[in-house]
Structures are given as structure tokens and as C-alpha cells.
Image (tube, rainbow, N blue to C red):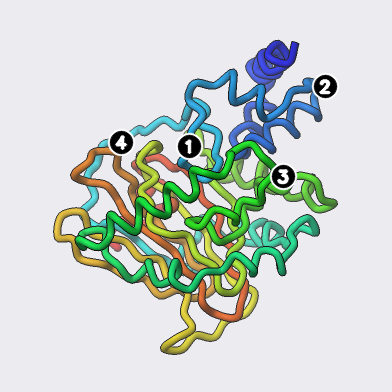
Amino acid sequence: MSQEAILHLYEKISESEEMKQQIRAVTTYRELVKLGEMYGCYFTAEDIAKASTDYNQQNNQEIAMSNSVSFLSKKSHQNLHYDFKCSDIPKFSEIASEFEKLKIKPSTVDINHFESFFKKDDLNFTSISPAEVAFNCRYEEIVSSDMSLQELEPNPEYTKRSFHLINLDLHVEHQLYKEFFLTKVRIVKCLENIFETEVRFSGSLWYPPSSYRLWHTNETQPGWRMYWIDFDGFESNKTEKSFFRYMNPQTKELVTLNEQPKIVRFFRVESDADKLFWHCIANTTKFNRWSFGFLIPDNWMEKLELYGI
Ligand SMILES: [Fe+2]
């Protein structure tokens, strides 16, 4: 019966432009269950897991639904990342205020419980390069520790050692969720107008003080990513920083991008074993950091009229 409910929801989506727009703002199974409820289709997370052979345990509890983002251009880009101030992208002037509405702290997050899972050794793992001999052993230990947690049990996402942060898209039972979701849908629509193709949300992440996402590759969803990043205040010094770190797959050099409020970052995730884009994030400031990610087309730079930068 519940499998039929999933199919029924997808039938409804196929017949409605509004719902197609909404599904592109969904990133977790909980959001899909919630969307089903909105349209009278009742199923559980377990039903989705059964129905989807693509269900992917590695990728932040994201649903591996068919990626309908079409990659229009095969232009090669030399840089592995691009950081911009939001204000330097004129085409984003309209959506900047929408992003402000996504910087929420759901009442369903127990911040003291979250903080109790902080592990300094794990945070320090962000300083070890994936190219180092010592890396694999530590990495495997953390992965197997995370795998021992049952994906569909109601464990908060931050109980995984590799994921000491809050995935806002897993918090669907609080008063702010409906407005939050509608804002995500509006942002996707706005980005689709700018990029002139389908765009998907890839994650809505709240990094409280002393949070981190350990080394990973996102290799199951290759393509360009765009992250809108902001803080609720900001000061940094030698020891208290917020950074995105990646390893150049060719040179094995570690690149650390120290952050500041209101930036937009672009980078490309690869699936080939020799091109994997290993990256990690840490916020060791006293401030809250939010980042909202999207799967965007290869020709994003052209569409944003940023050529020549
Ligand atoms: Fe990532």
C-alpha cells in the first residue's frame, strides 16, 4: 500500500509543474515523506528505502533520486574552485534576501546534545591530507563507526562522527519548516531562471560553533556545486576560523579557503578514482555558519556572466 503511495506521489509530480518545482528543493527522505503528506500520499522513510535501489547511505542521508539536472556544456575549467562575495554576483541580488530566511535554528535541535558529540581528535583529522599514509586508517575507522549507526533509526544526524553539524533538511517537524521549504522552492525557481535549466538543492546545513564535516568526496553525485555561505556574526583569528579545505587531485596540495560572511563558492565534484575531490569543512569560530548547496549546470559561469574573472 505504501509503495503505491510513493508511486502515486510521483504520478502527481509528473502531472504538476508546481510539484516538479517543489521536488527539486527536497534533499532528504524526511522532506519527501513530508511532501507526500502535503498531497495525501502517506508512506515512511523505510518505504522509500525499499523502493529506491539508489538509496545512498554515504551521502549525508540524501535521497539518491534521479538527478534531473541537465549538464548543457562540457567546457573545461582550470580552477578547482571559485569564491565570490555574494555582492559581486549582480544576478544574485534578488535571492540574497531569500537566503536570509533559510538561516534558521529549528526548535527540534537539542544544541547541548549536539555539543556533547564534539571530538577534538576528529576535528584535527581535517589537518591530515588524504594523500598521507596515516589517512586511510583514520578514515576507515570513522567510516566504520558511522556505518554502525542505523541510517533509518531516529538518531540525530550529528551522532555520525564524520558529520558534526545540523542538516536542516532532516528537521521537518518544527514551526519554521513550512516557510523554510517554500523559501527553498522559490530559490530553486529563481536559480532555474538564471541558469536556464533545472537546478536541485543538494543540502541545507547549519554549522554551529565548533562544528565540522570530515573528509569526503560526494563522488556519487558528480558535477558542479554552488554553496551560498553566511554567518550570524564574524570574527576570526589564528585559532578560531571557518574554512573549506580540499586536496588538489593532481598535485595532492591541500588548499584551505578561510571564510567570511556572505560568500558564494563553486567547485566540481568528480567520480573518477584519480580525480576525486576530497574536501572537508570546519567552523571553529564562536559564530553560527550556514551553507546551502545546489547542483548546477556546467555552464554556470556563462549564465552568471562571470567570464573574464
Ligand atoms: Fe561535500
Badge 1 amino acid:
Glu
3 horizontally vs 289: left or right: right
| Residue receiving disc 2 | 40
Q: Which of pointers 1 and 4 indicates the residue nearer the eye?
A: 4
Q: Which of pointers 3 and 1 indicates the residue nearer the eye?
A: 3
Q: Which of pointers 4 and 2 indicates the residue nearer the eye?
A: 2
| Residue receiving disc 1 | 196
| Residue receiving disc 3 | 181
Badge 2 amino acid:
Gly
Do the numbered discs 3 and 1 sit on residues whose CB atoms are within 8 Å?
A: no
| Residue receiving disc 4 | 73
Q: Residues within 10 Å of mark 3 (few under 14, many from 20)?
A: some
Q: Distance between the residues labelled 2 and 3?
A: 18 Å
Name the secondary structure under disc 4: loop
Q: Which of 51 and 11 is in front in this view?
A: 51
Name the secondary structure under disc 2: loop
Badge 4 amino acid:
Ser
Q: Position of residue 230 (x, y in %)?
A: 57, 68
Do the numbered discs 3 and 4 sit on residues whose CB atoms are within 8 Å?
A: no
